[in-house]
Amino acid sequence: MTSERPIFQLRKEISENISNETSLQNNTTVQEQNTTTSTTYNNKILTENEVYSVTRMATTLPSNQLSQYKYNGFIETTLQKALLCDKDNIFIWNYDSEQRSVPSVRIPLHDESESSLNQPPICLLTSPLAVSEPVESADTDSTTSINENCGVCIIERDTGKITYYEDVESINNLYSQLSKAMSHTLDLNLSKNEHITKVLNLEPAGIVVATSLGAVHFVTIRDNIGKPKISLKQTLIKAHRGILSHFFTPAQQSSNTENSHSIVSLNKGPLMGKGERLLYITTKCGDFQVWQLGVSSKTFKRINVNVFNKILESLQDLYPFAYGSLKLIDSHPLLSDAMNVQLFLSTISDNNNTFYIISTIIFDEQFNNFTIFSTYRLNTINSSLHNDQSMPRLLIPSSLEKTDRPIASVFVLFDNCLVITQISSKLDSSFTLKKKWEDIISFNDEIDIIGFGFDVDSLYLISKEVGGIMKITLKNTEKSIIGYQDLEETRFVKSHVEQATYFSNTSLGNPVEFNLPAGISLDRDIIEHDLMLCNNEIFDSTSQFIPKASSNLEQHLNSRINYYKNFLRYIELNFNNNISPICKLQLVENFETVNCALKFLHKLDKKDTFNDKLNNIWSSVLSKHNIKLEDLIINQLKQFPSLFIEFLKAIDFRTECNEFKSRLINILISCFYEAILEDGERTVRYDMFNLDPLEVNNEKLPWYINYDILSFLNTLFFNYKFSIKPDYPTSTEKKEQFLTLLKILYYFFNQIKLWRLQNPDKFVDEQTLEQISAIYTDSHTAWNDVLCELNYKEQSIRIADFYQDFESLVQTLETLEGQEQLYAQFFGKYDYEFASHLFKYYIANNKLSKLFYQFPEQHHQLVRFFEENIDEYRDISWIQDILDNNYSKASDDLLKLNLLRKPITKNQIHLNIAKLSGLVDESNINVESLDEIQSRLDLLDGEIYLKDQLKTSGKKLNPRYESTFFKTIFDEINKRLEKGITLPFNQIIDQYTLVNDSNFFFSAVKLTAFNSKSIEYEVKKFLIATLWRRAILCDEYIMNHTGTSNIAKSVLYQILTEYFTQDLFLSDLPLPNVKLVTNSFIVTDEYLENTYNDYELADDTAIPKIKESIQRDIDDVNSINELETLLHTIINEANVKSGNRCVVNYETNTIEHA
């Protein structure tokens, strides 16, 4: 039918003066020719992987003429035309041109004096071909579809008015007065509040229109001889108003229909001949119908079933929540030439998650029945739907092909993403058991997809924000999808990581959103495996997107660094909480290695004398390992760390000038501080990956935590400092060099500390760790001394504070004056940990006044410090005890002091103070402690007496021992006596008894008696036996006894006389007897080693020779005739001489009564 008035006007650009028509047409033709021949543009690749590519096509939208209102569009791939419309205009253009700007047809929808439409109409492009020559696909051999003109159907959503033009180009070039004859209109007479929801081009049969009340109308646009004629041939499904519709408002009625019988899918089927084509209809409630439509033939229904309940049954076992939440949202035929296999897209919801289900259903037309072949849930998306206007669309490009592929690709188009999966076109039952390949292409939030179309292997998306059309193309679909039917999720992760790595910076405003959508569940092992694959491809330059050769190695490394930054940023945004710290640390270390190599090459690139030296060293290292620089950087970068360390070891900077050292330091700062500490550790490890410093790689330390590097940096630090003249002012640049080197050293050493803390039982090279530890122990306070000398005290404090180097922190603080607030700050921050190091510093530097009086508010900390370190600081802690009036504790602590090798005078002072402190509290006097104190004082007096006697009396070593090792022992003890240090008890007794003098022997006896209770039993037994044995051997009365010998001259007699006179027998000191002095069993190797290992003996034969000498003494004593009788005689005479002060049992040589 022909309308009296067209609903749209011709484009304004055509002059209303008909006389100018020819001129304008000629001008237009010239402009188009110029545009065509001037410049062509390639499609812009936005992202790609081995399966698909996403490109932005060269042509742009006619954006300068688009309004800001809502608009929509679509793409007709059979005609290679794109259409956009808003509420005022329609634009049609050829989207497949290589030109950026192409001519477009603009069709105004109303006169300028009229208001805009309420919303953009729905438009269809129609083929200008005769009914017997339909265009099936872009693969058709005929090329006329590209250049032939097309028609357009314009359907107003609100009114249901349809306007059809057979030839758009004819309309475009006619005056409005002549266009009326070209328009064909139809009014569907929609009811109030009914509107158009879907339309479908079903040429050659006509078009199909669905409404919001579930009505489906079949409209023909040509008569049976192919002439344009628009008419409503049949209403296939009537509007569902219900028998009670008059009780509902129009809005309620429409809402009720939307939730039940609304049409969710209209799809065309194959041509059936004679201008007939199949139509597939799916409603929200699950009704599925197949109609056969034609212009002149009878319209009839071939299948009419409801699939809802069967789909629900297939889901309820796995998804119980499907009941009450299942919604059908789309369907699509799988095959191009058969109606019996259909795919249905539905959703089920559980709380905030929405799951998308694809059900493959096989229909049986003969029995009007069906079976569900397979059910598959999309794994890459679970976002909820907000309204019916943004329902996902199910698209199957292979359904346009006449030859079915074994594996069909399936697109599910959402508002802001596209999911791609696969299904068996041959309905292979084993395929349903296999893990299906699935991927998702996401778009930025601001991207609005306003139209689409697809052909056999590509999907086209129109977006104003993109400024054109995006094309998603499946690569070598026949091969790739079949090959990928068994792909695991690893492929999914790697694909997305690679796309983000290599394409996120391809252009500004890339519409592709590379970050994964929320809710995707991925296994950690799969993620880490794929991340390491991507990491290795960047590190080893094996990625297909990284060139395998380069004339500019620096530029090559810089590109890889940029890829690494994209890669690491993507991990931060998508997998930060899904991968292990070890995986993260490995990625960080690889990035740091590439970055270090880049900084290193950049620094060496400058040509001058200093760099020439360094370049020569670097070249010699490479030559030694028979590797070229290009091969190292591109193919063997994993060797860079070891080669770089070897390079450092080959530099002898000690003989170089300061300028050379300065340049070398700058290289190290660039490589270690900038490339590793700043770019790697701080930026990636801590800021991006949020790793805790205690999270370390348990398997190994980073390559730069190496003894050779640490030793090199430490030596260079001090060598550079000492080479600077003291009187020469240090520049700020040099100060910063020292500061930065110090930061590097501290960080590297701290990494070792943390690693050992986390891996205390890990097997490592202990010797190397000890060497590294020795460097730090010997140097760390000196590092801060340098900073203080450079007047960088504040920086020193900050660094020491950060790394909790309390020893250096205290040392630096002590260089400042009037900084009580700083001390208070650190007391408050670190409490006892800081206080203890401060106390140690005061003690080590003999600042005892500060220790006890500087910080009275830290008294409790000082008390705790002494309690926890009493063995180390007992010689100081007693002062605090006395200040606290705790005299008994002071006495006990002083008594427990180790006196050995300490100055005798100092020990006497301590013991006297201990004695006085023990007497302060008269009500609580510890007699045993006082006796012990006195015994020690007596021992010190005995040592002083021994020293004085040897010095003044001229007494020498007993000649008997001149040729034995006791000569060495005697001389060594004399040296120690001269030093005035306190000697062990056994050494004093040894020295006394090695002199042939009764006074010396008695002094030994007396000291032994006084210290009888404090000597270990075995030691006491050995010393007493030695004492009496040596006294016997130097006693002429015994050794050369005759009947006329004078007993008064006997050494043993003189000793025992004083023994009885001074009541020494009360001290449990036994009398000499043959059994005691001839006992060889107490002379053991173990005892001799423990006793004489304190001396610098000649060799390993010393102990055996000492033992041999002692055994000789024993043998000589055994050889004395009537020794037992002589001993009884001497003991008796001595006892009588002393006044018989005790009763002696001569059978046992013991004291019976005193």
Image: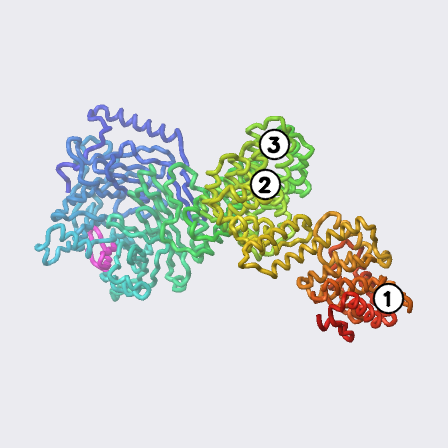
| Residue picked out by circle 3 | 663
For marks 2 and 1, the one nearer the N-term is: 2
- In the picture provided, is 260 more to the left or to the right than 945? left
Residue 867 on image: x %, y %: 54, 53
Position of residue 1037 relative to residue 228, above or below, is below
Magenta residues (range) = 279-302
Residue 631 on image: x %, y %: 61, 41
| Residue picked out by circle 1 | 1038
- SS at mark 1 in the image: helix
Type of the residue with mark 2: Thr
* Other residues around mark 3 within 10 Å, as few (<14) / some (14–19) / many (≥20): some
Q: CA distance from mark 2 to mark 1?
A: 67 Å
Q: Residue at x 83, y 53 (%)?
A: 956
- SS at mark 3 in the image: helix
* Other residues around mark 1 within 10 Å, as few (<14) / some (14–19) / many (≥20): many
Q: CA distance from mark 2 to mark 3?
A: 26 Å
- In the picture provided, is 313 more to the left or to the right than 704? left
Residue 162 on image: x %, y %: 18, 43
Residue 206 seen: no
| Residue picked out by circle 2 | 781
Residue 763 on image: x %, y %: 60, 56
Residue 1137 seen: yes
Dominant SS type (magenta): strand
Type of the residue with mark 1: Ile
Seen as rendered, the residue at the extreme bottom is: 1147
Type of the residue with mark 3: Arg
